[in-house]
Amino acid sequence: MNKFKTLLLVGAPGSGKGTQGRILGTIPGFYHCACGDVFRSLDTQSKLGKEFLKYSSKGQLVPDEITVKLWSKWIEKVVESGNFKPTRDFLVLDGIPRNVAQAKLMKEVIEVQHLFHLNVLDRDELVRRMKNRALKDNRLDDAHEEIIRRRLSIYEEESKPLLHYYKKISTHDIDASLAPAQVLYRILQGVLHS
């Protein structure tokens, strides 16, 4: 099997990965896959679904092997449906791989051609963005500053090391405090000019 040519969006919670992924997914030649979408579409009666619930129902992180298996099953269905055409489309990943262990599990399936690091240096700005998103999207668990700051710490410990793991890949550091259209422009420039 050929590997999926992949664009990876990496950034702290609130940096705009989901926004940029959704916009890119509307452009022909790009297919957006957010890890959250995979989890939300899960059949909770399946064997993998029951394993997922064992952890998520307790508020625990789902182990990397289960997360990657769920993602693999989901992406197979998307390819079979014809919604994602691997020979034509870039796969835009947001939220997966979440850490280096997941990246290693996925290396036989994805070929990361570009990594876009959506960087917001002002952590208070990220807190503000997440509080606004929590209210707008009715994600009240994300409205508490203590929870937001904990999620930012988890990003620093678990996800940020992906930047080092993929250091040989074409990496683009983008100021994600810019307007979404400016961030998108820089992502598209990165894809087209490398």
Image: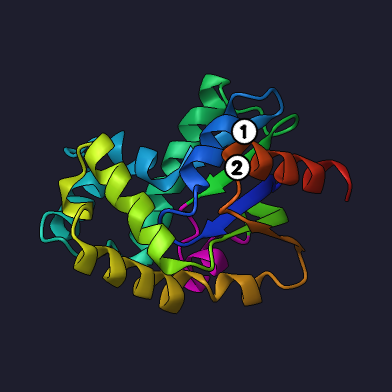
Residue 129 on image: x %, y %: 38, 50
Give residue 84's quadrant in the image: top right
Residue annotated with mark 2: 92
Residue 80 on image: x %, y %: 53, 25
Give residue 168's quadrant in the image: bottom right
Residue stretch in magenta: 95-107
Given residues 47 and 118, the one toward you in this image is 118
Please report the residue visible at 46 percent of the width from the left and 62 percent of the height from the top: 12
Under mark 1, the amino acid is Leu
Say few, some or many: other residues with alpha carbon within 10 Å of mark 2 (under 14 / 14 to 19 / 20 or more). Answer: many
Given residues 180 and 12, the one toward you in this image is 180
Residue annotated with mark 1: 24
Please report the residue visible at 28 percent of the width from the left and 61 percent of the height from the top: 62
Q: Is residue 42 visible?
A: no
Is the residue 171 above or below the residue 20 in the image? below
Say few, some or many: other residues with alpha carbon within 10 Å of mark 1 (under 14 / 14 to 19 / 20 or more). Answer: many
Whether residue 183 sits left or right of residue 151 in the image: it is: right
Residue 181 on image: x %, y %: 64, 36
Badge 1 element: helix
